[in-house]
């Protein structure tokens, strides 16, 4: 009996599982980044706590563009268009629904302390709900423009700090605990969005991504042999088994 209790406590104390974080370079072109920055520089920013629950409100200190404004919609559509035609994003996220992207800014010590994203999101202006499976941050400021501001994601290997060139994106599971470190100099502008994936389980989605990437590599090296067609069929049969539409 004692052993069982110790086992349960040990399980509870275990850190979260290792997670897949994927860097996607060049989601936006340099010209697009310049356009985004010009439009956002002239925009009206509101308190970032407008879009979070009680726990988030205690730790979130930043500014964002109000949801559903014409500017948020226009720039958000450009981000969704760029991401959905990106083969790496598609393979990693297997998107079913994408929530309109947010735009946020951190300066003067602003930060978003340790938190987990809410599981269910409401699609603004509709009665629709969606589940957040995959989180994506698209960096709009270059790393040299600000101090601090690393996106820090936790897993069983510790804390992973991410700070990418403007136009690049990082994709990570929405189930992860994460924070944005204080921006102590300059300004960090970014876009952020949630995706509901066809495959809700992080580990199943990761396995499909790795299988797909290796199929692409083998195809490049050996062409479409009969065995390759078989392995590609295996990918699709797993997707058929796990996908929810
Ligand atoms: Ni978050």
Image: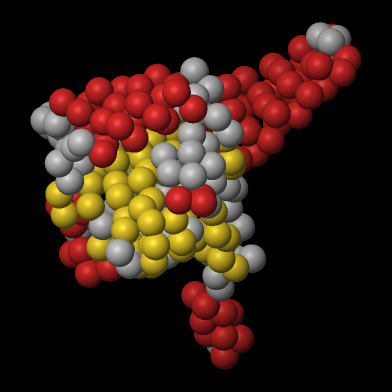
Closer-to-camera residue (113/213) = 113
Number of labelled discs?
0
Quadrant of residue 241 in the image? top right
Q: How is the image coloured?
A: secondary structure
* Left or right for 110, reference 10: left
Q: Residue placed at 58% from the left, 34% from the top?
A: 25
Q: Is residue 81 above or below residue 178?
A: above
Q: Residue placed at 26% from the left, 39% from the top?
A: 41
Question: As drawn, which residue projects farthest toward the bottom?
Answer: 2
Closer-to-camera residue (11/19) = 19
Quadrant of residue 33 in the image? top left
The percent position of residue 232, horizontal first and vertical second, equals 71, 18
* Left or right for 116, reference 145: left
Q: Is residue 45 above or below residue 168?
A: below
Quadrant of residue 178 in the image? bottom left
* Left or right for 193, reference 74: right
Closer-to-camera residue (81/97) = 81
Q: Quadrant of the N terminus?
A: bottom right
Is residue 151 at all visible to an observer of this figure?
yes
Is residue 241 at all visible to an observer of this figure?
no
The percent position of residue 148, horizontal first and vertical second, equals 46, 63
The percent position of residue 101, horizontal first and vertical second, equals 31, 35
Q: Quadrant of the C terminus?
A: top left
Q: Residue placed at 62% from the left, 20% from the top?
A: 236
The percent position of residue 231, horizontal first and vertical second, equals 76, 21
Q: Residue placed at 70% from the left, 29% from the top?
A: 213
């Amino acid at each position: 009996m004692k052993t069982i209790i110790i086992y349960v406590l040990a399980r509870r104390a275990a850190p979260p599982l290792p997670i897949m974080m994927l860097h996607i370079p060049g989601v936006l072109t340099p010209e697009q980044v310049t356009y985004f920055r010009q439009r956002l520089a002239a925009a009206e920013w509101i308190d970032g706590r407008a879009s979070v629950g009680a726990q988030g409100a205690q730790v979130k200190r930043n500014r964002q563009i109000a949801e559903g404004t014409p500017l948020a919609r226009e720039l958000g559509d450009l981000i969704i268009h760029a991401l959905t035609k990106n083969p790496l994003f598609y393979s990693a996220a297997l998107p079913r629904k994408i929530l309109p992207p947010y735009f946020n800014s951190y300066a003067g010590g602003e930060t978003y302390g340790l938190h987990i994203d809410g599981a269910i999101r409401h699609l603004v202006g509709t009665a629709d709900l969606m589940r957040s499976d995959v989180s994506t941050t698209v960096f709009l400021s270059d790393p040299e423009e600000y101090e601090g501001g690393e996106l820090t994601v936790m897993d069983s290997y510790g804390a992973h700090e991410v700070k990418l060139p403007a136009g690049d994106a990082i994709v990570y599971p929405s189930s992860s605990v994460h924070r944005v470190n204080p921006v102590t100099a300059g300004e960090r502008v970014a876009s952020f969005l949630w995706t509901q994936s066809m495959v809700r389980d992080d580990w199943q989605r990761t396995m499909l991504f790795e299988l797909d990437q290796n199929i692409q590599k083998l195809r490049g090296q050996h062409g479409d042999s009969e065995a390759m067609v078989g392995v590609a069929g295996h990918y699709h049969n797993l997707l058929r088994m796990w996908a929810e539409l």
